[in-house]
Image: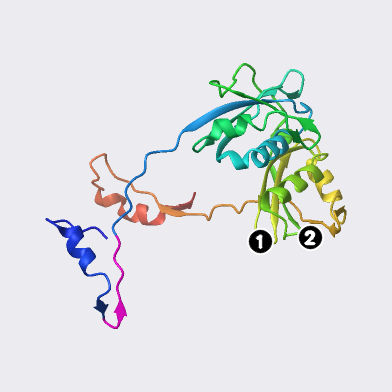
Amino acid sequence: MWIKGEGAEDKALQLSGTDVGGWTVIVKPKPKHEPPSPITTISVEGYDTSLQKYLLELILEKHFDSCGEIRHVYVPTDYERGVLKSVAFLRIEGEGAEDKALQLSGTDVVGWTVIVKPSEIFYDNSSRAPATTPEASKIHRFRVTGYDASLPEIDIQMALCKHFSSCGEIWQVTVLSSTAFVSLRGERCVDKALELSGCNMGERTLVVNEPVVPQPELLKRKRVRHCTTTGYMPPGTWDKADADVYDE
């Protein structure tokens, strides 16, 4: 709570431990604002450029998790060749994040050796995505159950991403307590994803449900107002206004 006045904080702290209607109040000063932690940018090389973009983002997030808080992972795409570009970028927040990240250079990341360098560049806008058909660009969201929910969230995300990689471009994997949602797009991605229902992932059998269809907004009934710009409604229009009701 906020209290204004001379010596308000000291007076409030003196009340800590006193009785308030049968319970003991504990009063603490509001924590002081700490200076923001430094944020560093690094570049990463060495990965297979044919990997799914979202999968690589998850792999990098997990590998550099010990360096600090991963603020963003950016993997640029070479749209002309249809593969990822060879250099990705990460922003990491925390004391000593850059040194910790550089120490991981040369380590193994699921079969490939990562090369880490400090970087000042983060975004690469040198190429643009080509135009696609409406069906190929539409994102479909599938509800998935049956996986091992005891695994860490990022491991479940990576496993599902690999499992559905043949269906199209993985857009996002959201993991809840016992249910996950896989968002993907591409030609025939719906049919391909549903065909994976009943397949094994590890020692578990996955269940893939039909794409989640967003619920349409409830129709709103509005009254047409026959009025001037000043808000005045001529008496002759009152009955008409009451009758003119439509669905938007």
Q: Quadrant of residue 3?
A: bottom left
**Chosen colour scheme:** rainbow
Residue that lies at the very extreme toward the bottom in this rendered image: 22
Q: Is residue 15 above or below residue 216?
A: below
Q: Which residue is pictured at 54% across the width and 35% down the height?
A: 97
Q: CA distance from mark 2 to mark 1?
A: 12 Å
Q: Which residue is pictured at 36% across the width and 52% down the height?
A: 241
Instruction: Between residue 158 and residue 210, name the one nearer to us.
Output: 158
Q: Which residue is pictured at 65% across the width and 28% down the height?
A: 75
Left or right relative to 213: residue 50: right
Three-letter code, disc 1: Ser
- Tell me how many marks there are: 2
Q: Is residue 219 above or below residue 75?
A: below
Q: Which mark is residue 139?
A: none
Instruction: Tell me if mark 1 has few (under 14), some (14-19) or many (20+) residues whose alpha carbon lies within 10 angstroms of its own.
Output: few
Three-letter code, disc 2: Gly
Residue range highlighted in magenta: 21-28
Expressed as whole percent of the image width and height from the top left, the position of residue 39 reads 49, 32
The answer to whether residue 25 is magenta is yes
Expressed as whole percent of the image width and height from the top left, the position of residue 122 reads 56, 24
The residue beneath circle 1 is 177
Judged by its main secondary structure, the magenta piece is: loop
Q: Quadrant of residue 207?
A: bottom right
Q: Which mark is residue 146?
A: 2
Q: Quadrant of residue 124?
A: top right
Instruction: Between residue 187 and residue 108, name the one nearer to us.
Output: 108
Q: Is residue 188 above or below residue 143?
A: above
Instruction: Between residue 11 and residue 162, name the one nearer to us.
Output: 11
